[in-house]
Image (tube, rainbow, N blue to C red):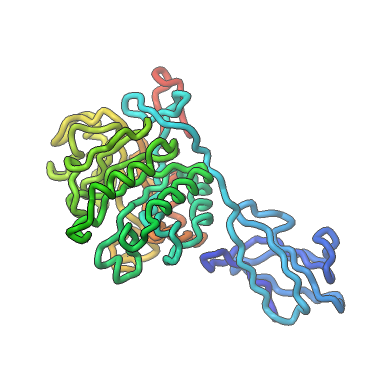
Amino acid sequence: MAQIQIRDIAGMAVPGINVRLALGHQSSDEAYDDRFTDLAGNTAWPNPLPSHDGYTLYVNHANVNPAFEQTQAHVPDLGTDVPFVLSRVPAQGQEQGFLGINGRNFITDDGRPWQFRGYSTHYLPNCVASGYACSPIRDVLAQVAEYGYNTLVSVGMHASPWKVVNNWAFNPITHPDYFTILGQMFDAAEDAKLRVAHAPLADMQHLPANFDKQWFWRESCAVMKGRWNVLPRKGNEDYSNGWHPAYYHFPDMGGLLLSHGSRGEGTSNKYNPYFPYLNWVEYEVVRRAPKMFLDLPLRQMMDGDFYGPATNCPTVNIEPMYFADTNPDHVGDARSTDPRVALEMGVMMAACAGGAFGCSWGLECKVLPAGSISDQCAREFIRGLKAGFVRPLAALDFQGDH
């Protein structure tokens, strides 16, 4: 029997979507039948009323699922399968205005504590450039906002041999309009009311000897400067990516909050955050279970109970354990597949200034299929992160999910 088939842009079934059937070109209100998709995203054609002018199908026009847009199509008969691909509604985040700092907390421009709820999208510049295996940026940002994350975590230099071979290379050499694309990335995030924690420096050891790294750094800073929705961080894992915080200095960034970037995974003195600290600090705990113990260094460094001076400023776990539907994931990297771990990680990071969720599909800026393990982990992490964000009422007149 022929079916109406509803899928999202990732090709996953969308259950519970209403489909209204009208004769010819009649309106949705004149429809003679209503159907809902099953768990497989399908619904069978009904026994049709005769029509010499075909039929119009109205998808998601009644009993609207707010996460997806409405669509419609006119078909000549009811004898064949009719597929629909539903785009997500461009969900809007809630971010606006410059951030400040009050002790160990980020604060909004009206003085309220703000939590770093990061979502790792390292290939976000590639996504804007198009031509890569990313989902449309509008759909990526919509899903991030729908989950409740407020900050995209992006990386600006992609030049390693692996990225070249696997068609992920993106830098001023491969793209002469690189800095225009970078500005468009920040604009797209601003339109979606999301912030971007952007790291220009990565893969620096793979650049040609005549590449002017300081020029690249200056131009990247110029694009970031003065944008309320940008949290500039120097780079990603300097020990692994051929750069060092001591050799790159922020110019005047127009009132933005600055970080030296991340140093790499570990709890030894080697991976201490670079000192003297800037406005906020990034750290990467060891990425293996049990997380109950391995997230403690993040809290310890705020109080000075580790190899370096107390950070005593907003401290963020920027790149913890990553998740995927399989372990290893599709490129062979070790991943967790346990939503419980994601939940517990979020709760523990909330005692600090926040943290960033990461999964393999998210890194590549692909929409997570509904119901997948990655989707479950993304939802559990943000649930824990929000639930644990409680601050002293006496000091801050603040508590809970804000």
Give the quarter of the figure containing the N terminus.
bottom right
As rendered, which of 363 and 278 lies closer to the eye?
Answer: 278
Residue 290 visible at all: no
Q: Residue at x 64, y 66 (%)?
A: 38
Q: Residue at x 58, y 51 (%)?
A: 90
The quadrant in which residue 161 appears is bottom left
The quadrant in which residue 344 appears is top left
Residue 399 higher or lower than 28, as above or below: above
Residue 249 higher or lower than 7, as above or below: above
Residue 349 higher or lower than 99, as above or below: below
The quadrant in which residue 335 appears is bottom left
Percent coordinates x, y for residue 88 in the rendering:
58, 56
Q: Return the residue found at the far top.
A: 394
Residue 254 visible at all: yes
Percent coordinates x, y for residue 248 in the rendering:
22, 42
Q: Residue at x 77, y 74 (%)?
A: 46
As rendered, which of 216 and 48 lies closer to the eye?
Answer: 216
Q: How many marks?
A: 0
